[in-house]
Amino acid sequence: MRRTLLVGALMAVSACGNGGGEGFRAQDLATDPAALDSVLNPLAEAYVKLVLAVGEHDPNYVDAYYGPPEWREAVQGTRAPLEQLRGTADSLLAALAPLPADSLAQLAQLRHRYLTRQLEAVRAYIGILGGQKLSFDEESRALYDAVAPTHPEAHFQTLLDSLAAVLPGAGPLPARVERFKREFIIPPEKVDTVFRAAIAEARRRTAAHMLLPAGEDFRLEYVTDQPWSGYNWYQGNSRSLIQINTQLPIYIDRAVDLGAHEGYPGHHVYNALLEAALVRGRGWPEYSVYPLYSPQSLVAEGSANYGIEVAFPGEERPAFERDVLYPLARLEPARAAEYERVRTLVERLSYAGNEAARKYLDGEIDADSAAQWLNRYALYEPERARQRVRFIDTYRSYVINYNHGQDLVRRYVEAQGGTAQDPDRRWRVFAELLSSPRLPSGLEVP
């Protein structure tokens, strides 16, 4: 991190607080967006370069970057000392603090809070890289601006009992679920056909309600030996690389899940709208970088999961799968309703994964016990449970971003009137969320 950049950013903020001379007064910042941007943009640029510098210590940290190439080139191979990086984060936070945040217009307030909270998360992750130990909940609050609710084993057992009552067969429930799901695996030679059909339909439905950037597109690849089932690598210029992990069998429901989550109206659309609205539209550099372990991830993952039901509401999802995807996969369409009933019951167990991660990362159980917990309470097959433990080893408390993030986004959208009974408004509120600098704490509904 070059000292000249930081000094310039701090001088800009100091000027706005001097009440006279050539600097901006507080009331100028509250009423003049250009004046505020002239103060915040240098700080935002310094934030971007700080994130890139932290990324030199962890290759997973910078999930996407499409700012000036020279910013990244300036830090490549440098591995600046963590204490120096933490000092930069502290200085930037100190520079942001005196700004008259409460008197700013709403969008400016959102930007100021976003930059502040993202920087706090950068500082927290620098501490983790330096060896600081946090509990699962402490880490999720520090990095993702949220703490997921806890649930006792009895909660999951009640859900398991409901599933056992409708699932045919005998024996332990995890084995019964595994046997049942085997009949709904997409044949390997049909995976690409099924996924492209699911993504195309998700794209069609999204484009009918959202104005997507001109020329937006994606490239689809299939990979193995990854801890995740799907990933969107945003490339900038409204382009994405979507990767699907084919190492384990892929069930028919995952085509819509991953097609909408990674593509439309999920990660691809979220990143493309932020780039169009904030980076290119307003010249805000902070959105040209995406630090994975940050509050932005909860909004990204939560909106991507919620976007599945926005794009395929109610009975429209099982109907599309039955009429289009099942025939393409050479599966029996008459069994689609049976599979959907089981899928929705299994989906209610998602928070069991959080409990496994919380217990494992807090040292209450070891990796084998975490896999057994996932098998028993989340109904992961043994191999898939071990893959999930690998995910937890890599991404730690990130797991809350999927289910807790989805719940936060759903409640926020519905509180704005975006309910299933008013799908047009739900799309509008959802699109506004994807295009604005929102934080998880800003999604909380009283």
Image (spheres, rainbow, N blue to C red):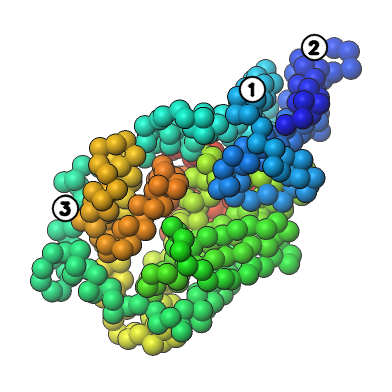
Q: Position of residue 58 (x, y in %)?
A: 56, 43
Quadrant location of residue 61?
A: top right
Local secondary structure at mark 1: helix
Q: Name the residue under label 3.
A: 158
Which residue lies at the image location 22% right of the left edge and 68% below the top edge? Answer: 177
In the image, 4: left or right of 218?
right
Measure the alpha-carbon separation of dots 3 and 1: 49 Å
Q: Closer to the camera, 13 or 73?
A: 73
Badge 2 density bin: few <14, some 14–19, many ≥20, Cα 10 Å: few
Which residue lies at the image location 72% right of the left edge and 31% below the top edge? Answer: 1
Badge 3 density bin: few <14, some 14–19, many ≥20, Cα 10 Å: few
Q: Position of residue 192 (x, y in %)?
A: 51, 79
Q: Closer to the camera, 236 or 314?
A: 236
The reply to whether callout 3 and callout 2 are in contact (CB within 8 Å) is: no
Residue farthest right in this picture: 22
Q: Name the residue under label 2.
A: 18
Quadrant occupied by the C terminus: top left
Q: Position of residue 231 (x, y in %)?
A: 52, 60
Residue farthest left in this picture: 170
Q: Which mark is residue 87?
A: 1
Badge 1 density bin: few <14, some 14–19, many ≥20, Cα 10 Å: few
Identity, as a three-letter code, of the amino acid under mark 3:
Thr
Residue 425: in sight, yes or no? no
Q: Residue 386 carries which label?
A: none
Identity, as a three-letter code, of the amino acid under mark 1:
Gly
The reply to whether callout 1 and callout 2 are in contact (CB within 8 Å) is: no
Whichever of callouts 3 and 1 sits on the residue coming sooner in the sequence is 1
Which residue lies at the image location 49% right of the left edge and 51% below the top edge? Answer: 301
Whichever of callouts 3 and 2 sits on the residue coming sooner in the sequence is 2
Q: Where is residue 127 in the image (x, y as percent from the top left)?
A: 51, 28
Quadrant location of residue 165?
A: bottom left
Whichever of callouts 1 and 2 sits on the residue coming sooner in the sequence is 2
